Amino acid sequence: MSKEITSRKEDYAQWYNDLIIKGELADYSAVRGCMVIKPYGFALWENMRDVLDRMFKDTGHVNAYFPLFIPKSFLSKEAAHVEGFAKECAVVTHYRLKNDPDKEGVIVDPEAKLEEELIVRPTSETIIWNTYKTWIQSYRDLPLLVNQWANVVRWEMRTRLFLRTTEFLWQEGHTAHATQQEAVDETVKMLDVYADFVENWMALPVIKGVKTPNERFAGAIDTYCIETLMQDGKALQAGTSHFLGQNFAKAFDVTFSDSNNKLDYVWASSWGVSTRLVGALVMAHSDDDGLALPPRIAPLQVVIVPIYKGNDQKEMIDAAANDLVAQLRSAGIRVKYDNSDHTRPGWKFAQHELKGVPVRVAIGARDLQNNQAELARRDTKEKMTVSVEGLPRTIISLLEEIQTSMFNKALSYRDQHITPVDTWEEFERVLKEKGGFISAHWDGEPETETRIKELTKATIRCIPLNNKQEKGKCILTGKESEQRVLFAVAY
Amino acid sequence: MSKEITSRKEDYAQWYNDLIIKGELADYSAVRGCMVIKPYGFALWENMRDVLDRMFKDTGHVNAYFPLFIPKSFLSKEAAHVEGFAKECAVVTHYRLKNDPDKEGVIVDPEAKLEEELIVRPTSETIIWNTYKTWIQSYRDLPLLVNQWANVVRWEMRTRLFLRTTEFLWQEGHTAHATQQEAVDETVKMLDVYADFVENWMALPVIKGVKTPNERFAGAIDTYCIETLMQDGKALQAGTSHFLGQNFAKAFDVTFSDSNNKLDYVWASSWGVSTRLVGALVMAHSDDDGLALPPRIAPLQVVIVPIYKGNDQKEMIDAAANDLVAQLRSAGIRVKYDNSDHTRPGWKFAQHELKGVPVRVAIGARDLQNNQAELARRDTKEKMTVSVEGLPRTIISLLEEIQTSMFNKALSYRDQHITPVDTWEEFERVLKEKGGFISAHWDGEPETETRIKELTKATIRCIPLNNKQEKGKCILTGKESEQRVLFAVAY
C-alpha cells in the first residue's frame, strides 16, 4: 500500500498529493476547496502551533479571539486593503432556513435576509482595528501585542491540500504601537521568530527579505517574508510580517494621547503563518517512500517494532520494549510500541516509513540475546545495530542528529539553488533547467516585474534583508539597478 | 472604577455583565450577537481548554479538523436533527464581492452565487459522519475517537456574553463504535470527564443526569448532561454527552464489517462543552467586588503588590518580591509582580479583586523588617500576616485551600437549593421565593413538561443518574409517577 506513491520524477504534484492522502495528513471534503485535517496531520499542526504559541508568549504577546464575521462595509474602509484583498470571500446573506413547502428538505428563508451582508474573515485587520478603537486611548494602553489562532476563508479557485485551501487555520498577530520605530521593530522581531521556528523546528532554511510593492500585503507599507525552497525548485513563502504604518488606525480612527497629551494615530504590525507550513514541511523533506518529519515536531518520534516467533519470544520482547517506552517517555520522547499482531513487521516498517517517523527500533529475539537492537533512521534510511545498554540515550542523540542533518541537507540543496544570472537568456534557461532562486538585477519598476512574471511565471520572492548594494543592469530592460533581488517560480 | 459594579441584589443580570466587561473577559463586537474574547478571558478559556484537551487525550482521543461549512442538503439527511436544530444559522450564498459601480464600497457579486448554499456549522455531526463514511470500513477502524476544537454559529436572537452568543468556541467529540454498549459507555465516560473537570478545576459541583425527550439533542437517542446552579437560583447546563445510536450512521450510510464479515451500521456518541463554561464560572463564584476565580484555572494565581515610600524601600522590596516570583514560578505558579508606579496600592488591590486573582501578597517596608508579608485571599477576603520564611509553600497550600473551599461553598449552596416538593402550590412558591432545583414527581408525559414550562418557565433539567425509584403523584397532573426529577428555571 505504501508503495503506491507516485515518484517525484514521474509527477511531483501527484507525489505530494499521495503523501498527504496516504500519509493520512488530510482528506478532501464534501465542501469545494475545504479539507479535512486528519488526526495525524492535526497532531503535526498542534505541535507546530504549540511551539509558536510559546514563542509568541515569550516575546510578550497574548491571545484573544475576534468574530468570524466582518460587516461588509468594514472591508472598504482601508482603500488598498479592499482593492487587493477582499473580493474572493464567503458572503453570509441570510440567517435562517425553513422547511421546503414543496418537498422534503430545507430552503433559505427569504424573510431572514441580513440588512448588511457579513463576510467570513479572510484576515482580521478590519474587525480588530475597529475593536482597538475602544481599547486604546492613552500611551499607557500601548503596545498592544495580541495574537489570534483562527480559521479564515478565501475563496480559492484552484486549491491544493494544505498549500492553498478555501478554509485554512492560521495565527494572525495584530499589534499597536506608539511610534513608527516600535512597530517596525515588532515587524522584524516576529519575522525573526518565524525564521527561528521554521529553521530550528521544521529544519527548513529560510531567506528573510522584503517584498516588492507588487507582492505586498494589501494595506501594508512593507511586507517582510521568509522564503523557502521546495524539492522541485519552486519557492514557497512560509510566513509574512507586515508593517502597516498608520493605515488601519486612520481607516478606523484609532488615536492615542501621548505622555504630553498630544493625540496621534497608532502604528501597527500584523503577521501570520498558516497550515500551509504543513505543506512546506512535507514538500521539503519527504521522498518517494513517504513523509520524512523532523524529530522536533513529528507527532511520533520513535516507533518500536517487535520481531518474534511464538508467545515466549513475544513476552520477552514486550518486556524489553515496554521498559524502553517508559524510559523514553520519561525523557519527553513521543514513542509508540507497535505490537499489533494482525500485521507483519515488513508491513509495519513500510507504514512507519510512509508516515515519516524519524527513528524505528526493531527488537528481535536474537537481538535481545545479544543485548542489541536495530535502529533505522527515516531521513537517510541508514540502519545500525546498537547496544541495548544506554539505548534511550543513543536514541535521543540520534533524534538530535537527524534534526540537524535534515536541516543541513535542505540548506545545502537551497544554497546550490541560488544562481546568480546576468542575461535574460541565462535567466530563462536556469528557470527552465534548474529552477530555484535566481539572483538577478531588476530596475525597480513594478511593470518590469509584471512583465517578467508574464513571460516566465517567476516573481520576485524578496529583496533579502541586508542585501549587498551592487550596481548592475536589469535582467529584462537593461536599465540601471542598485542591487540583485531573488526571483523564483513560487507556490 | 472597580467599585462601579452593580450589586447582585440590585440587578443580577447587570452584575454579570459588569463583571464580564469590567473584568476584561469579553467585549461586544460590531457584529450582532458575536463577542470579542479579550486577552484575560481568553487566557482563562485557554487554561480550561488545555486541561480538557489533556483529559481527552488521556482517555484515548485524538484531535482533527473538519470544514467550517456544511452543504445545506446535509442538514436534512437526519430527520430529527434538521427539525430540532438547523434552522437558525448563518447561510453563505455567494463567494465574491465586487466594486460598487454606482458609488464607493463593495457589493455582493450576483454572478457569484453558489449552486448549493453553505451553512456555517452549528454543530458538525453531519459533515463528520459524511467523512466517516470513507474512514470506516472494518471493525479494525473502530473505535474512532475524534475531538474537534472549533468555532460554531447559531443565530441567537437574545444573546448574553459567554452564556449565549451567535458565534462561540467549543469542542465537539464525535466517536464511532462497533457496538451499542461501547457507544453508551463512551457517552457516560465523557460525561464523567466533564464532571471531573467542572468539579475539580472549576470548583463547581454538578448533577449528572439524563435529559427528558423534550430536552434531548436533535438526533440523539439519549442526552446525558451535567447541571450546575448559579447564585440567582437558576440552573445552567454545563455540558452534554449524547448517545446517537445508529441515527447518523444510517443517515450517511456508514457501515462496517465485523470480524465475521457481517455488515452493520456504526454506533455513535457526540459530546461538547463551550465558552459558556466561562459564563458559568463567573456566575457561580463571583461577588459584588468582582470576579473570584478558582486557583487551578485562574490566568493569574498570585499577585504581589509592593508598598513603599521612596526608592530605597522600593529596591529592598523589589529584591524580595523578585525572589518570591522566581520561587513561585519554578513551582509552576502563575504569578505577577505588580510594581507599576503610576497607580497606588489601593487602586491595585481593587483591580486585582475585580479580576479575581486568588491570592494577593502585599509586601511593605516594615513587613520586610519583621520578616513578614500580608496575604489576602480573594474568595473570603480574609487577610493574614505570615512569615517570609517558607512563603512559597504557604502560598501554594493557600491556593489549594482556596480551591477546596470555593468548591465546598458552591456545594453547600447547591445542596441547600435542592428542594423536594409534593404539591403544585409549593412548587410555584419555591420556584418564586427560593429558586434552585426542585425535586418533584412527573408523570413522564412530554405534554406535562411543556405545560409546566409554560406556567412557570421551569424545565426538567435532568433525571439524575442512579435516581431513586419512588412512587408518587405528578406535581401537575396527579398521575402516577415512578420517580422524582429535577426542575429548575435555567439559563
Image (cartoon, coloured by chain):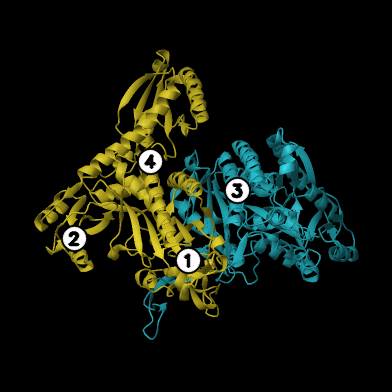
Chain colours: A cyan, B yellow
Q: Quadrant of residue A459?
A: bottom right
Same-subunit check for callouts 2 and 1? yes
Residue located beneath label 2 in the image: B442
Question: Mark 1 or 4, which is nearer the eye?
Answer: 1
Tell me which amino acid carries mark 1.
Answer: Val
Residue A296 image position (x, y, % from top left):
66, 44
Residue located beneath label 1 in the image: B266
Question: Mark 3 or 4, which is nearer the eye?
Answer: 4
Q: Which mark is residue A47?
A: 3
As helix, strand or loop, the secondary structure at mark 3 comes to: helix
The quadrant of the picture occupied by the N terminus of chain A is: bottom right
Question: Mark 1 or 3, which is nearer the eye?
Answer: 1
**Chain name for mark 4:** B
The quadrant of the picture occupied by the C terminus of chain A is: bottom right
Tell me which amino acid carries mark 3.
Answer: Asn
Residue B470 image position (x, y, % from top left):
18, 54
As helix, strand or loop, the secondary structure at mark 1 comes to: loop
Q: Earlier in the sequence, mark 4 or mark 2?
A: 4
